[in-house]
Amino acid sequence: MDIAVVKYSGESTGRKINLDSEVFGIEPNDHAIYLDVKSIQANQRQGTHKSKQRNEISGSSKKIKKQKGTGGARAGNIKNPQFKGGGRIFGPQPRDYSFKLNKKVKDLARKSALTYKAKENSISILEDFNFEAPKTKQYLSMLKSLALSDKKTLFVIPEAIKNIVLSGRNVQNSKIITASQINTFDVMNADQLVLIESSISSINNILK
């Protein structure tokens, strides 16, 4: 698939780049995408939720009434889960939600996500550039020139370019990552994938 290369000002360079069909043109695998996104989100969960069981509640352990003859149900102590302020039965406990996903499945998921973006014509390629100084105003001007102001964008740069990262880090609905950080969730979550020209070879090297 050939995609035109443009400058960050929105002007055409008159050049086109052919995206590798082994990365951007495979048969998408929806289940691999599902597993990878699930893995990414699960790995981000803190898992620090906790509720107290009856053995952790402060209170007397004295039997609050006699066993028989009251006409009501039996009761042990005030920490009984049936009472207000008692312990919780089968409450949440700290746990690790992360799970392992094979590298081949992750690679397949990322290729599938990139293929979907290519099929939807949701990939833009920018000629390599850098800002002279970190300026959010200049970053917003670039989005406007590319007609991306109202879209959720994912910028993929070849490496951490300080001025670009600082310029765009606080812009709503726009995320900047390096080619080595590309993942299925970010790609699928974006309306438009913007690749800096030199990042394409890095993506190909990672996924081929």
Image: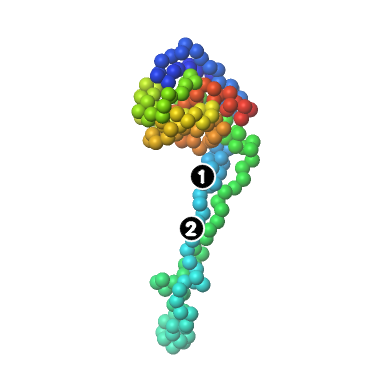
Q: Which residue is mark 1?
A: 41
Q: Amino acid at mark 2?
A: His
The spot of residue 50 in percent (x, y) is 49, 61
Q: Residues within 10 Å of mark 2 (few under 14, many from 20)?
A: few
Q: What's the distance in space between the residues labelled 1 and 2, CA to CA?
A: 16 Å
Apparent side of residue 29 relative to residue 166 in the rendered image (left or right): right
Q: Are marks 1 and 2 in contact (CB under 8 Å)?
A: no
- Vertical position of residue 14 compared to residue 184: above or below: above
* Residue drawn at 36 percent across, 24 percent down: 141
- The quarter of the image holding the N terminus is top right
State the residue lying farthest toward the top. Answer: 14
The spot of residue 205 in percent (x, y) is 62, 27
* Residue drawn at 57 percent across, 30 percent down: 111
Residue 180 seen in the figure: yes
The picture quadrant where one finds residue 145 is top left
Q: Amino acid at mark 1?
A: Gln
- The quarter of the image holding the C terminus is top right
Tell which circle, 1 or 2, labels the residue nearer the N-terminal end: 1
Q: Residues within 10 Å of mark 1 (few under 14, many from 20)?
A: few
- Vertical position of residue 91 compared to residue 113: above or below: below
The spot of residue 110 in percent (x, y) is 56, 33
* Residue drawn at 50 percent across, 68 percent down: 53
Apparent side of residue 96 relative to residue 130 in the rendered image (left or right): right
The spot of residue 147 in percent (x, y) is 37, 23
Mark 2 falls on what kind of element?
Answer: loop
* Residue drawn at 48 percent across, 58 percent down: 49
Q: Nearer the viewer, residue 104 or 116?
A: 104
The picture quadrant where one finds residue 69 is bottom left
Residue 49's disc number: 2
Mark 1 falls on what kind of element?
Answer: helix
Q: Nearer the viewer, residue 109 or 163?
A: 163
